[in-house]
Image (spheres, rainbow, N blue to C red):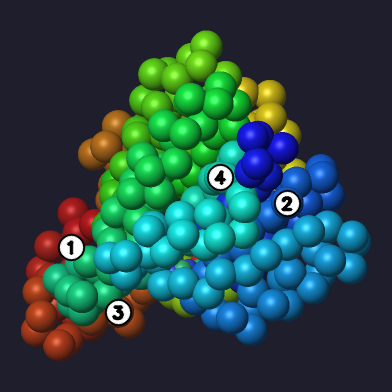
């Protein structure tokens, strides 16, 4: 108890995937968890799984992109006598394809969810945590945060923001008792891979996929031990090492080739396939 209020671990993006797995780990560690996502059905199933193991889980169906989302979450916590002790920002999505051809609104939606909502929630809940001298934030970044990513440009850029923001906050909050941890996994076996279209790209076919439960264990343990950055698994660590060693002139064309499919439409908007349009004209230099 903190005064009359009870601490909760608030997980946004908890109806499935990595968020659901982190909520399960936190509940198994004795936390009261608040699960947030749009799908009431998904949330109810996630809460039922936690309650089966005698954990306490509350649910709030909410579209985080709505302007009043953070306020509605704060009101929900107050109404239930809870404070946000730990915030887990796991809601996010990506899109594979050429930035000039993907729908603008769907790309801006990545900024709204992966950046604006994550920032809004983090900045709203952090001051309370600092005043109490405990708790913190787990932000889901990605190995994509270590490089620009042609043909998933918005997604990689959004994750670059998440890592930069989180690591800076970690430093600012040293010795306050509050931790901000960025978790940067490689591919994880969740719906994300299909919904983003990433699973159709060679890059995601060659990289090994981790289980969400493994990522969740690593994330929770890393956060509890005050880590700034958690890169779960050997293959993700190697990927980040390679990305840091390769010059951009080599790395960006490589990622572009591995994320573009040969039958993808050409970014120039001709309607032709890239390989028989700009790809053919630019020959080996095309990336
Ligand atoms: N899977 C990977 O390969 C991978 C790798 C590195 C990093 N990540 C990152 O890890 C995080 C979690 O990804 P995941 O793999 O668990 O994806 P996922 O299985 O697709 O889950 C995404 C979660 O976000 C929620 N969500 C999406 N849009 C929302 C909105 N507008 N408002 C509220 N909730 C919303 C979804 O629930 P509803 O649809 O019910 O709203 C769901 O609970 C993301 O930030 C992702 O970028 C994933």
Which callout, 3 or 4, points to the residue nearer the camera? 4
Which callout, 1 or 4, points to the residue nearer the camera? 4
Viewer-proximal residue among 58 and 233: 58
Mark 4, Cα crowd under 10 Å, few <14 / some 14-19 / many 20+, is many
Residue that numbered label 1 is attached to: 283
* Label 3 secondary element: loop
* Label 4 secondary element: strand
Question: How far, Cα to Cα, is label 1 from label 4?
Answer: 54 Å
| Marks 4 and 2 in Cβ contact (< 8 Å) | no
Residue 209 as seen in the image, left or right of residue 242: right
Residue that numbered label 3 is attached to: 264
* Label 1 secondary element: helix
Viewer-proximal residue among 227 and 277: 227
Q: Locate residue 240, reporting x and y percent.
A: 49, 36
- Quarter of the picture containing the N terminus is top right
Question: How far, Cα to Cα, is label 1 from label 3?
Answer: 16 Å
* Label 2 secondary element: strand
| Marks 2 and 1 in Cβ contact (< 8 Å) | no
Residue lying at 30% horizontally and 32% vertically, measured from the top left: 247
The circle on residue 32 is: 2
Question: How far, Cα to Cα, is label 3 from label 4?
Answer: 44 Å
Viewer-proximal residue among 274 and 71: 71
- Quarter of the picture containing the C terminus is bottom left
Viewer-proximal residue among 143 and 66: 66
Residue lying at 89% horizontally and 60% vertically, measured from the top left: 54
Which callout, 2 or 3, points to the residue nearer the camera? 2
Residue that numbered label 4 is attached to: 84
Numbered label tally: 4
Residue 102 as seen in the image, left or right of residue 70: left
Mark earlier in primary sequence (4, 2): 2
């Amino acid at each position: 108890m903190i005064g009359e209020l009870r601490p909760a671990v608030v997980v946004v993006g908890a109806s499935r995937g990595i968020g659901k797995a982190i909520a399960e780990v936190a509940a198994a560690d004795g936390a009261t968890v608040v699960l947030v996502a749009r799908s009431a059905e998904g949330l109810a199933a996630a809460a039922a799984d936690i309650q089966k193991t005698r954990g306490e889980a509350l649910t709030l169906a909410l579209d985080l992109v709505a302007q009043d989302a953070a306020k509605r979450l704060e009101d929900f916590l107050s109404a239930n006598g809870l404070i946000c002790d730990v915030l887990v920002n796991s809601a996010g999505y990506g899109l594979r394809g050429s930035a000039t051809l993907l729908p603008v609104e769907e790309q801006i939606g990545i900024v709204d969810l992966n950046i604006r909502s994550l920032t809004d929630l983090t900045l709203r809940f952090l001051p309370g945590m600092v005043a109490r001298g405990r708790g913190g934030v787990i932000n889901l970044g990605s190995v994509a945060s270590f490089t620009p990513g042609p043909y998933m440009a918005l997604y990689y850029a959004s994750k670059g923001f998440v890592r930069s923001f989180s690591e800076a906050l970690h430093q600012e909050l040293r010795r306050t008792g509050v931790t901000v941890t960025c978790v940067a996994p490689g591919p994880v076996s969740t719906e994300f891979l299909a919904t983003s279209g990433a699973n159709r790209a060679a890059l995601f076919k060659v990289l090994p996929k981790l289980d969400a439960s493994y990522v969740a264990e690593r994330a929770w343990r890393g956060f509890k031990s005050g880590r700034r950055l958690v890169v779960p698994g050997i293959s993700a660590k190697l990927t980040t090492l390679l990305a840091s060693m390769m010059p951009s002139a080599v790395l960006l064309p490589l990622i572009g080739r591995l994320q573009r499919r040969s039958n993808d439409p050409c970014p120039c908007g001709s309607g032709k396939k890239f390989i028989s349009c700009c790809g053919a004209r630019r020959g080996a230099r095309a990336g």
